[in-house]
Structures are given as structure tokens and as C-alpha cells.
Amino acid sequence: MKIVQSIKKFLSNIPVAGWLLGILAAVLIEYFWGYDYISDYLGLPKIPVLFGAILMLKDPVMIPGVLAYDLVVYVLPVCIVGKASAFFTNPLAGAMEKLPLWISVLIHLCCFYGILSLWAGINDYRVLVVKLTLISIILTISINVINGYQGEFSCSHPGFMAVGAYVSSVITLFLFTNDKIFGAALLPPALGPWLFPFALVIGGIAAAVASLLVAIPSFRTRGDYLAIISLAFMFIVKSAVENINVIGGARGMGGQPDLAPLHVIFIWTMLCIWVVHNFVTSIMGKALNAVRDDEAASESMTVKTRKTKMTAFMFGAFWAGIAGGLFAHVLTYINPGMFSINRLAEILAMVYFGGLNSIVGSIVGAVSINILGEALRPLELFKWIIIPLILIFVMIFRPYGLISFKEINAGKLLAAKKNK
Amino acid sequence: MESFTDLIQFFIQNFINALQRGSFYAVISIGYSMVYGVLMLFNFAHGDIFMLGTYIGFGIATLFLALFAGVLPGPVIFVATVVVTMFLASWIGVFVEVAGYRPLRQAPRASAAITGLMIGIIFETGILILLGAKRLSFPPLIESVSYNVGGVYFTNVKLMIIIISLLLMLGLHTFIQKTKWGMAMRAMSYDFLAVPLMGVSINIMAPLTFAIGAGLAAVAGILYGQAYPILDPYMGVMIGWKAFVAAILGGRGSIKGAALAGYLLGFIEIFVATIFPSTLRDLIAYSIILLILTFRPRGFFGMEYSTKLRL
């Protein structure tokens, strides 16, 4: 324990900027020497994709090599560069503190995106994992608005996602591709990236309108009945899509233009975090919590409960629709089976694992469940025993999730660390 | 006149099919409803308990058929299978309660729901790992005989399923209305907070309720195996969710309501599938449920609980 504490103390004066610099160094080392020298020397077949978890599980002989790789490429550079650069990153962070908060957050985010894209760019698999993780973050945050902040148990998120995915896919197929069903492209494909946000937003709005089907019954019911209504909504959407042959029916719909590169998804995710954060800290967000804690009391305190519920549902559904649209354009293929019970279990697992009523918790939940799912892939079926067991233990020991009812203050997080 | 008798025939034929389908939903949804009555929580692993029960029934039936096939008559083997399977499966219910729900007595309800879902996933995967992906087929315990009464076809298996389900429900009703244990259960669902103070231990009642629910689900599993002999680790998912819907539709905690809603669901499904294209089955069934719950938010026999009892 003493060692851990001394390491903690040793690293305690590194600001976030310093950590970013350290991670940049690690990623650069991997980028330039990762394959040619380090993994070759350690006898690894290729660069370990997700910190070597997959390699380790596939072939236990690789474990020492992978651990050495992680140590040499990630741990040591991050710590050493972070510590060594603390003498100038601390004043830098201090200088940025004087700027308005949004500028310094933006600067940090840009740096983070640069590092992320460099890290992910090493192979396609990493890009896909990062993209799906970012989409999961949007989904988890949006369901947290309904299940966490508003306190309903809504099961309809896959349905909202499906609506958004199908609507935005139909728009992009209609406008930018030569599709068999939707005819020739109406607009030059070069316009695609510029008009894609509008397609996404229309998908989101469609999902928000569809959510009224769940929101209006929620005026009169709560809890289990609403859970069933939302569940029924999800099955209705899935079943309806299966029966509409124009959009592929049960076979699914493919051929969406690849309009969702990493930076687009990153920007949408950050936008989602920002907007949802502002929403839940606004008066409306406080009203959500009030309705969750006591509907009758909040009604008597002039909270319009119906409007609040409707807003929460439409807002959550809007972002779920956006996530669905991005999802469709990442995979360039969707079918109704993707938006069913399995997806629901995954989304619920992410939000309840991470923590209710917390954006940071949602991010933690989405990232950990996604990375865990990918890292344990070589275990095949046993993955579906390990992940549920982890969730059960989290539920038993932290019933509200890992990080619940807590938020991180961005200003404090990015501030310079003083030496104690 | 000819077409009229055709219509009657068609109706009775589908009526029998719907009764059979509804029997499964009714028996399984009673399990949900009973647990809700005692704990005010839904046991989301119930669909997978049904699946496990079917697999246990499959194992027991195969064993008994191998041992006593020529020695004992078919119905005796059937009854023995049902009894042994019920006994074994009820321990699964106890296990789920003790491992998944007891540590979460004070936790928010959603956490318990997640735990139940996760236990279900573990059961599915466990069966998949143990037995592999090959599809097993349930051995027929009763020789199927077809009857034709006035143009309506049915088999003795169908009749047996309907009758045994009704008998089970009748037995459960007697248990709940006449015995001391049943009285404790009713009291528990009437007042969740005061009854433990009267000397009724929730740590005995809850496992008992889970055990009865699991036993019923296992019998439903054996009957299901007689009607649709293909076993599949994911068979409990769809049936479980539908039975859950039926339990809510009947009014939470109401066993009568759950049974009735189970039959209603069976009727909706069968008649929709015969009148409309079968791909529309789920769409119409769930739309009807959405409508019912929009206009009757407490289900058929739901009591007016205060929603603040437990969040």
C-alpha cells in the first residue's frame, strides 16, 4: 500500500494537460516504433489492439510479452513524460485557467481528439471500436435523461434508435446514393458530409415525435406500467419496420453512404455531452429530478409535471435517434433485429453500470462495457457469463451504479495542480 | 348455411389453439405476478427459469423413459417427470431469490431488475456452454392421438395441456385462499411493510414464492416441450417477456388477472395470426396492449398501490 501511495504522490502534480502530453508521447512511440521494433522484439505478431487483452486471452504464452509491451509503450512514457513535463504544463494549465472555461475545454478536447485519432488510426478495428464506443456514450447519456434524471424505467430506447437510424438512412439513401429502391442520387455525393447533420437531426426529431407515444401514457402511469408501455413501443417499432418492405423489411437496409468518420462522431458526442449537461443543470433539469423524487409535491410547487415528462422523453429520444443515425452510417447496414431485446439489455447494462443521474457515470459505463465486450471477445460464450456477473456485483455493492449523482467540475479538472 | 358452419368450425379450431397458447402465457405469468405480490419486484429471470425448467424436464423425461419405458405406463412416467422436475426447478427459483434478489432488498427497484436480467443471461449462456448449440428435441411422453369432432381437429396433447394448466391454476388458487402459507402471501401483497412485523418472515415467504413460480414455469416447460418439441436456450426470452406483459396487463400482484391476461394474449396472437399475415402478429398484439394500458393504466385487477412504497 505504501508503494501505491508514494506513486500516487509522485504523480499527483500532473495536470490534465500533462497527462495528455504523456499519452501523446505513448501514442507517438507506438506509431513510429510499435510495430518495427517493440512488438517485433517482444515476439508479438502485431501491435496489440486493445492493450493486448485479445492477444493475452487467445494465447497465454503471450502474456509476458504483452505486459512488457504495455509497460514500455504506455505506462512508462505516460508517467515519465507527464512527470517530466509538469514543470511547464502546470504554468500552461494556469495560463489556460485565466481564459474562459469553454476555450480551455475546447483546446483540451482538440488535443484529445488528435491523440485519439492517432491512436485509433493504427488499424481499422480500433477505429470501429472507438466509433461504437462514442455512439454508446450518446445512447447512455440519452437514456440517463429518462431513466436517471427523470426516474422512469423506460425500455424503449432501441425503438427510438431504430426510428432515428431508419429515417436518417432513408434520407441519405434518397439524396446521395444511386439506390435500387430510392432511385438515382438527387444531390452530388460531395454535399453529403455537409447535409448529413440535417439528416441526423431529422432522424432525431422523428424519434422525438415517436417518443410521444410513450410520453403521453406516462402522464397517468409510472413504474412498471410505463416499462411495459415502452417495451411494447419497442416491439411495435421493430415489428413495423419488419413489415415495411420499402425499407428492406426483416432483411435490413444496406448501402448507406459512409458519412460518419471518426471526427463527425466525436463532434456529435461532445455536442451531446455539452447539450445534455446544460439541459440537466437548467431549471428544466431540476424539474426532472423533482418529478422523480416526488411527483405530487413538485406539482404543488408549480412544476408542470406533464410538460417535464414530455420534455424528458422527447429530449432523450432525440439523442437516441441521433445515435441511431450515426450507428447506421458507421455500419452502413441495419436490420430490425439490431434494435431488439439484446440492444436493450446492453443499453440498460451500460447506464446502470455507470451510474444514474450522472453524465460522467454514463461515459464510464458506456466505455467500460464496450471495451470489456471487445476485450473479452476471445472468450466467446464465457464473455456473457463474466459481464453479467460483474454487473450483478456492481448492483449488489453499488446499487445506483459506479458513479451516480456526481458530476465532475470541468474547471477544477483542468486546473493546474499545486505542489503540496 | 354452409359458410356459417365453416365459420363456427374455424372459430372453434382457433379457440382451442388459442387456449393452448394462452395456457403457457397464463401459467408463466402467474409466476411473475406472485413474486410481484410479495416483493413488489418483477423476477426478470423468470423466462429463463422456464427455459431451465424445460431442459430439466427434458433430462428427467429422457432418464425415466430410458429406465421405465416398458415397465410403467406412459401417464405414470409423465406424472413422475412433472413432479420431479417441479421439485428440482423450484430450487432454481430459491437460488435466484437468494443470490440475486436478497442482497438487493434495500436497493432501488431498477437494480433488482438488472440483476434479474443478468441472471437470465447467465442461465442462457450456461446452457449454451454446457449443451452446445445443437437443438435437442423433447421426447413425447404421451402418445399423440388426433380427434375430429364435427370438422374440428385436436389432439389429446392439446387437451391435456389445457386441462393441466387449468388444474394447476385451480390448485394454486386453493393454496393461496385456503392455507396458512397462502394467507401469509396474500397479507404480504396487501401490505408490504406491516406484515413482516406480524411475524411473517419475508426471508421465508420470498423464496417460497420464487419456488412456486419456478415450479409452475417448469411444468409449463414440460407442456411446452410436448407441444413444440424443439429446445433452444433462448426460448425463454420471447415467452418470458410476453408473460411479463400479461402479468402487468392483469394488474400487478393479481394472480387472477395474470391468468386472464395470459389467455387474452394467447387469443390475440392466434386470431391475429390467422386473420392477418403472421408477420403482423407482434405489431397488432403490442398495439392492443398499448391501447389497453393507455386507457386502463392499472391493468385488469390492479390494486391502487401508492407508488411511493418503494422506488
Image (tube, grey):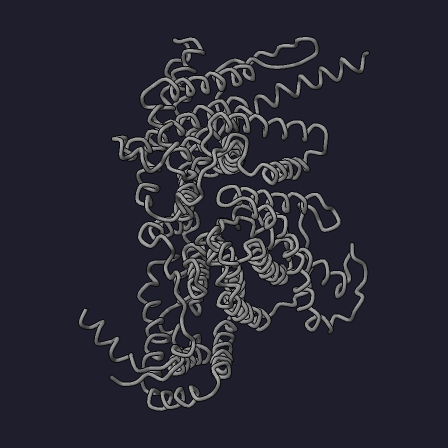
Report the quarter where the C terminus of chain A lies: bottom left
Report whether B302 appears left or right of B278: left
Report whether A302 appears left or right of B306: right
Report whether B264 appears left or right of A104: right
Given residues A33 and B64, the one toward you in this image is B64
**Measured from the top left, where is residue A228 in percent x and y?**
54, 42
Q: Quadrant of residue A97?
A: bottom left
**Residue at 66% of width from left, 21% of height from top?**
B14
Q: Is residue A361 above or below residue B180?
A: below
Residue B232 visible at all: no
Q: Is residue A118 above or below residue B281?
A: below
Report whether A181 appears left or right of A1: right
Report the quarter where the N terminus of chain A lies: bottom left
**Measured from the top left, where is residue A352 in percent x and y?**
42, 54
Given residues B268 and B41, the one toward you in this image is B41
Q: Is residue A292 above or below residue B183?
A: below
Given residues A143 and B235, the one toward you in this image is A143
Q: Quadrant of residue A27?
A: bottom left
**Measured from the top left, where is residue B287 in percent x and y?**
64, 39
Which residue ends up furthest to the left in the rendered image?
A2
**Residue at 45% of width from left, 62% of height from top?**
A362
**Residue at 48% of width from left, 80% of height from top?**
A105
Given residues B174 and A16, the one toward you in this image is B174
Residue B47 visible at all: yes
**Measured from the top left, where is residue B294 in percent x and y?**
60, 41
Circle count: 0
